[in-house]
Structure formats: C-alpha cells, structure tokens
Amino acid sequence: MRTFGEIKGLIETGLGRNPCDLKLANVRLVNVFSGEVYPTDIYIKGKRIVSIDPEAGLEAAQVIDCGGQYAMPGFIDSHMHFESTMLSPEALANIVVPKGTTTLCADLMEIANVAGEEGLRATLASLERLPYRMLIEVSSRVPTAPGLETNGAVLGVEEVERIMVWEESVSLGELDPSKILMVRDEYLEKVEKTLARRKIVNGHAIGRMGQELNVYASSGISDDHECVEPEELLARLRLGMRVLVREGSTERNVDTLMKGVLDMGLSCENLCFCTDDKHATEILEEGHINYNVNRSIQLGVDPMSAIQIATINAARHFRVEDEIGSITPGRLADIIISPSMKAVQPAMVLFEGKLVAENGEMVELCQVETYPDWIKDTVHLKNPITAESFRVAGEGDSAHVNVIELIDKQIINKWITTDLPVANGAILHDLSRDIVKLAVVERYGKTGGVGVGFVKGFTIKCGAMAYSMSHDHHNIVVVGCDDADMALAVNEVARLHGGLAVAVDGEILNSMPLPIGGLMSEEPAAVVMELLDGMNAAAEKTGCTLPAPFMTLSFISLPTVPELGITDLGLVDVLQHKLIPLLAE
C-alpha cells in the first residue's frame, strides 16, 4: 500500500526537489511492459522506483555503476509451500534471494493442517524480518480430505474469511476438483467470499479434462499448477485459466510443458512459474525460479518471454502489478542485476530498494528466530507402535491387493492390482517385484489409527524410512520391507517431535529433527542441507535409488492426487474421493 508520504515524496524527488537514495547507473533495462531492452539509469527513493528515464539526471546519495549489466524485475514464485523445503521462512531467504526471487506466493496449508490459524500466525511472525515478500494463498483445504483422514486443525469458512482480510492475503489456496464437482457448500462459500473481495482462487486440477474441467473452471478457479502434459496445459488456457509451470524436487514439469508451448506455438502471456515443493539442496544446486527461466530459454523460449513469465505475468495474475513485477516508476524496487538475460545468475539482488544479495551470497544473513514451544510439540502417538501395527491379515497362499505404483519425476501415481504372498496369516511384500509396505500413522493423539498398504517403485531392499510430513494431513508416513524397522523409524520420528528417520536391521541409521509443526527445522539452511544429505545417504543404504526419497515419501500418501492415496484410515480412491479396501476385487 502506498502511503500519502510515499506518493508525495516520489513526486518531489522526481521533480528534483530531494535527492534519490540510490541510482543504478549504466544498466540495460529489461522492460517487461514494452518487451524492450535498452540502456538507462534507475532512480530509487526509499522502497520505490522514481524514474527510469535515461535523461532524468537526478541526484542520488549513492550510485552503483552496473557496468552495462541487465536489470530485470525480481522473480515471483507463484505457488509454493515453505514446509516442503524443511526450512523456516528466515532460513529459506538465504538460499532463494541470491537466486533472484523476491516474492513468494505461499500456501501455508501444511502448518495450517497441523496447527490451524495460530500456526499461521506463528509462522508469519517472521514477515517483517524477511528480505523478500511473502504473499499468502489462504489455505482452502484444512483438512484436505474430510472423512478420509485425521489432521490437526480446521480452517472453516469463518477462519478463511478472517485470514483473507490480512494485508498479505492475495488468493484462496489450491482447491482440488472434488470440492467443486461434488458441490460441497463449504468450499463454494470460501470461493464466494474470495471472489467478493476481488481476489483469485488457485486451482489443483490434476488429471481433470473435458466437461469436468469446464465445470471446475466455471466455479471461479483461476489457475492450475498440476499440468503434466502439454495437452493439459492447452485445455486450461482455452478455458481462461492461467497455468503455473512447476519445477519442484519430484514434480519436474518445465521441460515437457515448455517444449509443448513451443511446439504448439502458444502465447506465454498466461503462463507463470512456480516451484510448489522443492528441497533446499535442489534450490542451491540448480536454482529457484531462475532455473525455470534459464531452462525455458535453453529449450528455445525467447528470453524476454521467459522473464515476463517469472515477473509481470505472475504480478498481473495476483492483481498486484501496481506494486511488483516490473521496473517502472512507483513500483517497489525489486531488481535483479545479471550479466546475462539468457542465463540469469544474479550479480546483485535488491528488495524494496535495498541491496540484499551480491554474487550469490546474502549481504546479511537472515537469522532464524526462536519459535514458540507449543508449535514444537505436535507429535503425539495415542497407542504404542510395534511391528504388529503394520501386520496385514490374509488367507490362503496369496492375496489380490490394490497397490500404489510410483511414476518417475511426478507426484501422480498408478493404481495397479497384483497378487502378493501370504504366510502365517499375513500378507507380505515382494522384493523381487519392488513392492514393499507403506503405512500412515496418526500423530495427533486423536485416533491412533494406522493405515497400511503396498507401494511399487521405492527400490527398497531392507529397512524402513519414516517422515512426519505426509501431505496434507501430515501424519507419519513410513515405507519399508521390515515391520520392526518400520515401527522403529516411526517411534524415532515421534521421539524427535517430528522429522525423518531411517532404520535398518533394528538400528536407526540416521534421523533428523523437524520440530516446527513436525515440518520445519529451526536450523540455518546450510545445516539443514547437510543433515538432509546424511538422510539421503542413509536412504541409499536401504537400496532406495530415488533422487529425492523423502519428498517422494511425503507425497505418496496424498489423498487428492490420482490415482491412489493412503491415510491413517486406509487406501483412498482419489477420483471417487472414497476409502477402499486393501484387497482388490
């Protein structure tokens, strides 16, 4: 919000009555409005841009000669979840800001599912300390799958409406099709309240096409970040939905979708970029939104178009283009200075007129504050977890069961059926076909439920892995081929008040605490990445060859992503939105 003082100050500074605070001299401006690149100077007063006129000749207290480098707007991540990074908002700043990201549109549904509105407030206590902007996509699905899972809290219509008036709130967070196609009044009311405030509704239309997608779009859904194939992207654009092209740790969509855009000759005007869920290690190694930009350019997308996708397109989508998304007078001075616009590696990053990162490093590290004790005490097992907790009764010599099969580099999965051996009255895994047990353990101390199933694709040969982040209910999810090791890993996660654990042959090989809601660490990014490297190395000792095993584990239980999910209540038929038995017909 521009204040009277800011408006008057910008005018008087532009008229030469007061000096600017900063002049970025000798830049090649990437003007995302006109689509031009041209030499000029950028003048800044306080948080905002005064002028981009090369003939302005204004005085400035500080001048930085940019040596003819490119100046482009700070990048916008149009949809992400902090909790999936395992980092606090402060720790995340230290790895995304040097990559050029100055705005994160965050759906905090993970912490909301654990701790509700108070959990959101605890997380947002860091806002004023952050060297980036956090815009809130108000969580629409808390719980995500009512009646199919046990979670920690509820955000109903009243809570959503209350949060929607927060200054940071820009949209209603991702709403999956079941809430619309099953005509569920509570969610339609949330949509109504959002649209009445002239804010947008984010989508989550995975796997939907044809008339179902038309009905979904007709409710007021504005976008979708779940496109996997170009045909899905085109279908959404035709219906007036924007597509948020995602590149996360396990959801690798940029190559396929941007190649499709080029092959079909589509306009990039209604595309944005997002990460959704990306671990800190991948951000550090390959980039954040600048990866999406750079990879798109490598694939053949025009550099100006790629930068527009990451900036002005997203700002327009969230109706904040009057504040961010461009380097133009009056806008907030979020600026990347890069030697190249074809391979964006920021030499400098400014946030609201202040230099916050230089040559890939923060000018000043953002320090992680202490979070309240109550939000670090959210894991409570109602019943003892033992090997017997994961025993699945069976009759005869074999059982025909429903199995979740992983799909490489995606969060969607296949629903297959197969025969598994039965011995001593229990259904067993089958390592020869890479089928092992998968279970979800209720961790809020409410029911003590344990849902058990089978999964194909983890390549586990021994032991077990457990994680207290299982989307979106965030109970403890565990995968393994030994019931005793599965119990050991789950109990270790509970002992840590949330986190990750790997157990093999009756021993904990490694574990990592995530005390903030059982989802995030209080440690700096460098420490978290080192710990995660150790966890990934431990996962390899089980035989697991997945590039991001714990990210995959966190998504495999999701009851809103086709085709099968699993919760503490059992297997879920995602498209039919109902619980199904483990035994197949």
Image: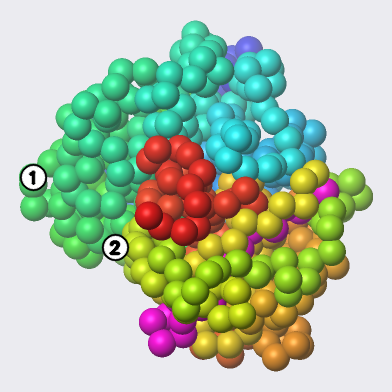
Could you give the CA–CA distance between mark 1 and mark 2, rounded to whole angstroms?
A: 18 Å
Residue that numbered label 2 is attached to: 295
In which image quadrant can residue 525 be found?
Answer: bottom right
Task: Tell me: residue 56, above or below residue 274.
Answer: above
Q: Is residue 531 above or below residue 56?
A: below
Tell me the quarter of the image containing the C terminus.
Answer: bottom left
Residue 13 at x, y percent in the picture: 55, 24
Q: Is residue 227 magenta?
A: no
Q: In this image, 367 relative to 86: left or right? A: right
Residue 176: percent from left, percent from top: 44, 34
Q: Mark 2: which secondary structure? A: helix
Q: Please rate how many residues cluster around mark 1, counting C-alpha atoms within 10 Å: few if below 14, some from 14 to 19, many from 20.
A: few
The spot of residue 82 in percent (x, y) is: 61, 50
Secondary structure of residue under mark 1: loop
In the image, farthest residue toward the front: 396
State which region is magenta.
428-445
Closer to the camera in the image, 515 or 66: 515
Instruction: Tell me the residue at 79%/66% (across/down).
Output: 385
Location of residue 377 with respect to 460 vertically, above or below:
above
| Dot 1 amino acid type | Gly
Which residue does the image show at 70% across and 30% down from the upper left? 154
| Depth check, front residue: 156 or 126 | 156
Q: Is residue 63 visible?
A: no
Question: Looking at the rendering, which quadrant does residue 150 occupy?
Answer: top right
Q: Earlier in the sequence, mark 1 or mark 2?
A: 1
Is residue 426 in view from this perspective? yes
**Residue located beneath label 1 in the image:** 265
Instruction: Name the residue: 72% across, 80% down.
Output: 484
Quarter that holds the N terminus: top right
